[in-house]
Amino acid sequence: MDAPRIKAEWENFKGYISMTWEKVSEQELVRLAGDLSAVVALIEEKYRDPKEKIEAKIKELFDLYLERKAQLKEEIGEIRDDLAERSSRILHGIRDKSTEYTDTAKQRIDKLRRENIDPAMDKSEEYIKLHPFTAVLGALGAGVLLGGLIGLLARKD
């Protein structure tokens, strides 16, 4: 029996001992801290089973423990891989939707510009070409008005 390995795995393995030999308390197993000869002696004392039978059962339990541990490790690896794959798919989905929304927003902005802003700019340019004097006077009036408002606000402070 691999006593050093059992001692190294004792914290997780001791549950197998307490489930198999119910008269052995969890506190006793904690106190023995993986000392295999002391564990065998305690079980032998409480159950009056031969030492060889107890050691064989502990070996069988430890092999089962190692098998289950390896199985769990493999299953956890599979779950980790599955989560990584799902996360990657979700991330790609988010990126695709983001690109789609960005493209849609750009198309809407272009449409608004073509339908509203460009025609207004064309009409403004056309008006300025037809009525340059009125446009300059209008701009001058707007400038004077803004300058006056700014001056009033500056004097209040």
Image: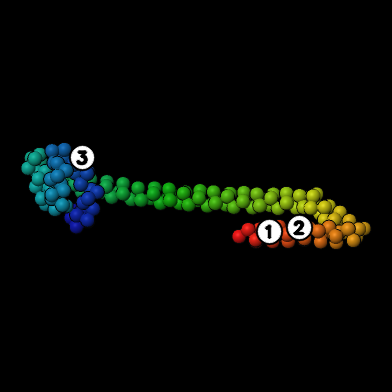
When asked about the image quadrant of residue 45, the answer is top left
Mark nearer the N terminus (2 vs 3) = 3
1 or 2: tag closer to the N-terminus: 2
The residue at the far front in this view is: 155
- Tell me, yes or no, whether the two marked residues, 1 and 2, touch with CB atoms within 8 Å: no
Q: Quick one: 23 or 115, which is closer to the camera?
A: 115
Q: Which residue is mark 2?
A: 145
Percent coordinates x, y for residue 155 in the rendering: 65, 61
> Horizontal and vertical percent for residue 13?
23, 48
Q: Residue furthest right?
A: 130
Left or right side of 96 for 87: left
Q: Amino acid at mark 2?
A: Leu
Q: Is residue 109 visible?
A: yes
Comparing labels 3 and 1, the label whose residue is closer to the camera: 1
Q: Nearer the viewer, residue 40 or 97?
A: 97
Find numbered disc 3 in the image and state the secondary structure of the residue it sits on.
helix
Quarter of the C terminus within the rendering: bottom right
Calculate the distance from the C-alpha at mark 2 to the C-alpha at mark 3.
Answer: 93 Å
Callout 1 crowding tier (Cα within 10 Å): few <14, some 14–19, many ≥20: few
Q: Which residue is mark 3?
A: 19
Q: Which residue is mark 1?
A: 152
Render colour scheme: rainbow
x%, y% of residue 152?
Answer: 68, 58
Spatial CA span between label 3 and label 1:
90 Å
Which amino acid is tagged 1? Leu
